[in-house]
Image: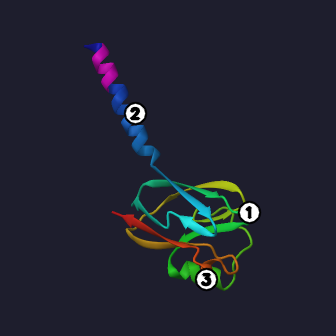
Amino acid sequence: MLVLLAALSTIVSGCASAEAAGTSVEIGIRYSRFHPANVTVPRGRPVTFVIRNDDPIDHEWIIGSEAVHEAHRTGSEAHHDGRPTEVTVPALSTRETTVTLAEAGSLEFLCHLPGHEAYGMSGTLTVEG
């Protein structure tokens, strides 16, 4: 009986750890496009985005409201460090960032490097909750 209780305790602990660890989402960049371009994540849980740039040029991955994107359209920074929702992804590299989104709704993710958004480098992030 003790062995059974110990095994059950280990299984429950493993489930709690997996839930606490959150979700992981891979986003690829190829030919100046995000793949997938539509992503759904849970509200209020940490999500680790693994962003892989397979292009021979730099990109950025910025998620936010229209106000966030408008600020970047009119004065984009050369590099993004320290903000989990704004990531510079150099050519042929992979970056990870973890974000917890508190509100349900829809946000865009874009690359604001010159001409990239106009070319179609955008996606939609749906936060369910």
* Mark 3: few/some/many CA within 10 Å (<14, 14-19, 20+): few
Q: Label 1: state its secondary structure.
A: loop
Earlier residue among tags 3 and 1 = 1
Residue at the location (73% across, 61% down)?
A: 91
* Amino acid at dot 1: Pro
Residue identifier under label 1:
56
Q: Residue furthest front?
A: 31
Provide residue 43's location: percent of width, then percent of height: 39, 61
Q: Label 2, on which residue?
A: 14
37 up-or-down from 68: above or below = above
> Is there CB contact under 8 Å for labels 3 and 1?
no
The image shows a total of numbered marks equal to: 3
Q: Nearer the viewer, mark 3 or mark 2?
A: 3
Please name the residue shown 61% across and 79% down the image. 119
Residue sitting at 57 percent across and 77 percent down?
Answer: 120
Gap between marks 1 and 2, in whole Å? 40 Å
Residue 17 is situated, as x and y percent measured from the top left of the image, at: 43, 38
Q: Secondary structure at mark 2?
A: helix
- Label ID, residue 75: none
Tell me the residue that label 3 is attached to.
Answer: 118
- Pick whichever of labels 1 and 2 is earlier in the sequence: 2
Which amino acid type is shown beneath numbered disc 3?
Ala
User: Bounds of the magenta span?
Assistant: 3-8
Does the segment drawn in magenta span residue 94? no
Residue type indicated by callout 2: Gly
Q: Position of residue 57 (x, y in %)?
A: 73, 66
Which label's residue is closer to the chain start, 3 or 2?
Answer: 2
Q: Nearer the viewer, mark 1 or mark 2?
A: 1
Q: Residue at x 72, y 66 (%)?
A: 58
State the separation of the CA atoms marked 3 and 2: 45 Å
The prevailing secondary structure element of the residues shown in magenta is helix
Q: Residues within 10 Å of mark 1 (few under 14, many from 20)?
A: few
